[in-house]
Amino acid sequence: MADVLRQRITAGAFPGGMLPDERLLTAQLGASRNAVREALALLRAEGLITRRRGVGTMVTMPKYGHGLDRLAGLAETLTGHGTVTNEVRAAEIVTDPPPVITERLELPAGTAVLRIERLRRLGGLPLSLDTSYLPADIGRAVAAGDLTGRDVFALIEESTGCLLGRADVTVHAVTADADTAALLEIACGAAVFAIERLTRLSDGRPVDVESLRIRADRMTLHATLRR
């Protein structure tokens, strides 16, 4: 029951964020009053809804969908859901990057790369902390662009004159450390989505090693899979 309600909430099925009362939910879901009450209690414990006597049950904060079956930047994905802004925390050449970074970018060990770190907000509230490593020749051109207002993907395509081709993506859940939690304005130890992504140009060249930490209470990840 909680899964059904959670899916409806994340799909935006309740206009204005107000859920029907327990009696109506019981009729709509074909469930017992106790089952509905237990499901609502679980969703409340998760922080997805709030319940107030005389007011009703409301979604605490809307969640936004981010598809994993299309290569798109965050601002592009969230078009129509509000304004995405970027606080550039770092845009610097790293002369001695971690070996795993140069390996994934298929560069000789010790090759300089550009590191970009941005805190991304939607509607003024923190949404994700993104860190990207790019080959220095491309990174310098990207860093000269509008990192506060545009997606890195768009700047890569613009500076190289080449479209992005594909990306390898890994998603897992981690708990936020103290620094990440402070930046995302969540409790230390709260669950966040961790996305590791290697993006290539259409000619196959690896161009962006990216690590994202996304607030799990503000976003859902989805994909359309075909057999």
Image (cartoon, rainbow, N blue to C red):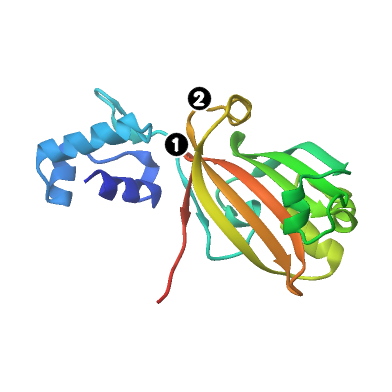
The mark closer to the camera, 2 or 1, is 2
* Mark 1, residue position: 61
Question: Is tag 2's residue or tag 1's residue first in the polypeptide sequence?
Answer: 1
* Mark 2, residue position: 187
Residue at 58 percent across and 52 percent down: it is: 78
Q: Residue 53, position in %: x, y?
A: 24, 22
Q: Is residue 176 above or below residue 213?
A: above
Q: In this view, does 71 lie above or below 89?
A: below
Alpha carbon distance from label 2 to label 1: 16 Å
Q: Is 207 left, or right, of 18 in this rendering?
A: right
Identify the amino acid type marked 2: Ala
Identify the amino acid type marked 1: Met
Task: Using the image as rendered, state which of residue 33 and residue 24 is in the foreground.
Answer: 33
Q: Is 116 left, or right, of 63 in this rendering?
A: right
Q: Quadrant of residue 165?
A: bottom right
Q: Is 168 left, or right, of 163 in this rendering?
A: left
At mark 1, the secondary structure is loop
* Residue 35 appears in view: yes
Q: Is 218 left, or right, of 109 in this rendering?
A: left
Residue at 68 percent across and 50 percent down: it is: 210
Q: Residue 26, position in %: x, y?
A: 14, 44
Task: Using the image as rendered, state which of residue 7 and residue 216 is in the foreground.
Answer: 216
Task: Using the image as rendered, state which of residue 88 and residue 93 is in the foreground.
Answer: 93
Residue at 76 percent across and 59 percent down: it is: 105
Q: Residue 145, position in %: x, y?
A: 85, 51
How would you rate the neighbour count of disc 1 (Cα within 10 Å): few for under 14, some for 14-19, many for 20 or more? some
At mark 2, the secondary structure is loop
Marks 2,1: beta carbons within 8 A:
no
Residue at 30 percent across and 36 percent down: it is: 43
Task: Tell me the tag on residue 146.
Answer: none
Q: Is residue 117 above or below residue 144?
A: above
Q: Quadrant for the C terminus, please.
A: bottom left
